[in-house]
Image (cartoon, rainbow, N blue to C red):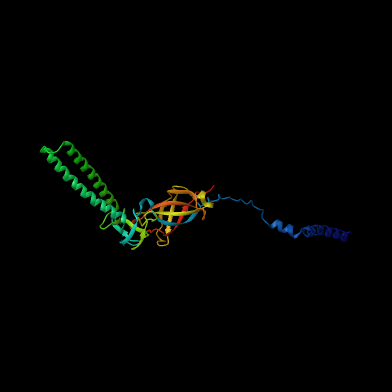
Amino acid sequence: MNLPNQSRRRQSALALPAVLGLLFFTACTPSDADALDEPAPQAIVIQSKAAPEAAPETLVLSGEIAADANRTARVFPRVGGQVLRVGVDLGDEVKQSQVLAVLQSREIAELQNQSTAGTAELAVARKNLAVAEELFDNGLAAGQDVFKARAELARATGTATRNHRQLDTYGMARGGQYELKAPVSGYVIEKNVAAGLRFNAADMPAAFTVANLDSVWVMANVFEADLTLVHRGQAVEITTLSYPDQPLQGRINQVFHVLDHDSKVMKVRCTLPNPGHLLKPGMHAQVRVLAASTK
């Protein structure tokens, strides 16, 4: 019988699939196995966001509080002489027509003498006219005498009037004295006289400067590189060292299109109301200007 041979053939047929399976798994690399276990990659979607608009650029300028020139008056002596008394000091508050100083001048003394003589001549002319008219009425004088007397009275009247007006212009006192008075109400921000000072009117600077501080100017400095960032009508925020927590709002109302020869800066100005006169000329100010954003 051929049983042993058939048994061997049956065992070989069963072992063949097992060997083929082993060879198949041996041929697979670790990377291939891992690749079989990994999930398929998914597409990544990137959403782009629009870039935010650039914030407007802020320009910060250094500045200074100044008196409003439209509310400022400079007081000059009209004639030379000597200062007798000074009634105010720098920084004092004064009222309109208040006497600032009393001066003495030889020119004023001469005007006073002329005024006195003119007044006397006027009185004589009036008396002469009255006498001439009385004589004419009584037939003792000609009409020509009355005419001359009236002409003399008119001349004397004109001279006396002119002398009085000149003395009123100088603010006459007594003994060749005249007074310097404040033309406006405000504060004395400049004083260039002292008692005993002798001066010539032609060479004398302003004896006093009086400024009304109901409104003030803020003068800010703009460097050459920033000239294109400022313009008239632009809104500004102003802070001072004295009141850092009280910013003030204003607008540029004047651009001076001239650069300072030494500092190479251009001035811009804004006008601020000044209730309570808290802002003083000469105070430092910081001016924040909202410049136009560039696109």
Q: Quadrant of residue 219?
A: bottom left
The answer to whether one can see residue 96 in this image is: no
- Which residue does the image show at 74% across and 59% down from the upper left? 31
Residue 29, image x, y percentages: 76, 59
- Residue furthest to the left: 138
Is residue 185 rendered to the left or right of residue 39?
Answer: left
Q: How many marks?
A: 0
Residue 210, image x, y percentages: 35, 56
- Which residue does the image show at 33% across and 60% down from the upper left? 82
Is residue 100 rendered to the left or right of residue 6?
Answer: left
Q: Nearer the viewer, residue 153 or 222?
A: 153
Q: Nearer the viewer, residue 238 or 55?
A: 238
Residue 155, image x, y percentages: 24, 43
The answer to whether one can see residue 8 in this image is: yes
- Residue furthest to the front: 140
Q: Nearer the viewer, residue 242 or 32?
A: 242
- Which residue does the image show at 21% across and 48% down from the upper left? 121
- Residue furthest to the right: 1
Q: Nearer the viewer, residue 207 or 68?
A: 207
Rendered-image quadrant of the N terminus = bottom right
- Which residue does the image show at 42% across and 51% down from the upper left? 270
Q: Quadrant of residue 212?
A: bottom left
Residue 21, image x, y percentages: 78, 58
